[in-house]
Amino acid sequence: MVDPMTDMDRGQPARLDVTERHRSSNLWFEAARNLLHSPSAVLGLIIIGALVLTAIAAPLIATHDPIKTMIGVPGEIGRLPSKPPCIPILGCDEPMHILGLDLNARDLFSRIIFGTRTSLSVGVITISLSIIVGTALGITAGFFGGTVDNVIMRLMDVVLAFPALLLAISIVTILGPGLTNALLGITITFIPQYARLSRASVLSIKEQEFVVAERALGASPIRIVLAHILPNSITPIVVQGTLGIGTAILDAAALSFLGLGAQPPTPEWGQILSESRNYLFTSPHLVFFPGIAIMITVLGFNLLGDGMRDALDPRLNRS
């Protein structure tokens, strides 16, 4: 007697799921190998790795308390506010301040080291929240379509109609200055990018054969989204997110520079620049070092993002 059960009845979808997961893992392994063969991506990884280690080990690396003034400290001599860099091994007889002191006689090196924590935290948290909210909105719009799609995407168009930094400034101005409100303002400006990216991916994936087959078998929308659509649409989001961290750090520094982000005495690179902007020619070290820190951080994330884009692009021919 012929068994009426087809391969699909016997559990063919389960075997397809296993094959699909295996193929996906191979693709990510191949992408990781391509990433490590990209000089710019490796350089970006080294820079970011060094920044992360610096943020973690900040209390061990910093030579002084970042918010403590040196005025009245025993052993401190000479001009304290905005004192230039002083390294005893290079012939300086005063107490060591590798990058000098700021206008409040606080050790600039220690403030920049601890500022790494603040800037990286703002960048990662902002982009993570933007990806979560934006991807959820984009997948919902692309999967259900119709009125849901129109409402969500028109709302995203309204947000995109405003210049990003100007919108963030407006939000922080309404909510009040502070690092938390600055983080919220920057997050809102980034959400439409990830909503559009995820929606575009969903529109191309949801009509593919394996998704249609799942629907025919009665799979729930949540299963289709989590098992098929989300894993296959995550690549451009990851790349954009990596590039977006550098931009978020720049935006946070800009808000702090305007007095809307981190407030004194919090060590944050944009806030350090804001305090010293009028002393560019008389005490250039106060502006130069935090500016270099911002530049190196943004460069690291941009290099890594470009490398990830190339490594995850299946259209590139690699030997």
Image (tube, rainbow, N blue to C red):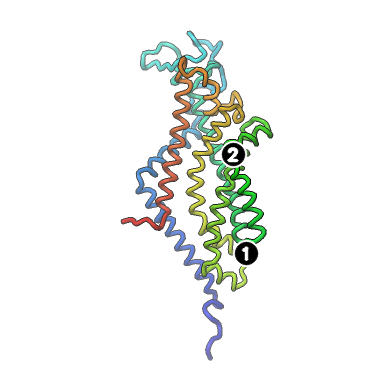
Residue 150 placement (x, y as % from top left): 64, 56
- Residue depth check, mark 2 versus mark 1: number of the one nearer the observer: 2
Residue 77 placement (x, y as % from top left): 48, 9
Mark 2 is surrounded, within 10 Å at the Cα level, by few (under 14), some (14 to 19) or many (20 or more) other residues, namely many
Quadrant in the rendering for residue 96:
top left
Report the amino acid beneath label 2: Ile
At x 43% / y 53%, what residue is drawn? 312
Residue 101 placement (x, y as % from top left): 49, 17
**Residue that mark 1 sits on:** 221
At x 40% / y 50%, what residue is drawn? 310
Residue 21 placement (x, y as % from top left): 49, 63
Q: Can residue 49 be seen in the rendering of this structure?
A: no
Instruction: Spot the residue most to the left.
Output: 319
At x 61% / y 42%, what residue is drawn? 188
**Residue that mark 2 sits on:** 186
Which is nearer the eye, 189 or 97? 189
Q: Secondary structure at mark 1?
A: helix
Q: Secondary structure at mark 2?
A: helix
Report the amino acid beneath label 1: Pro
Question: Left or right: 44 with respect to 13?
Answer: left
Q: Can residue 39 be seen in the rendering of this structure?
A: yes
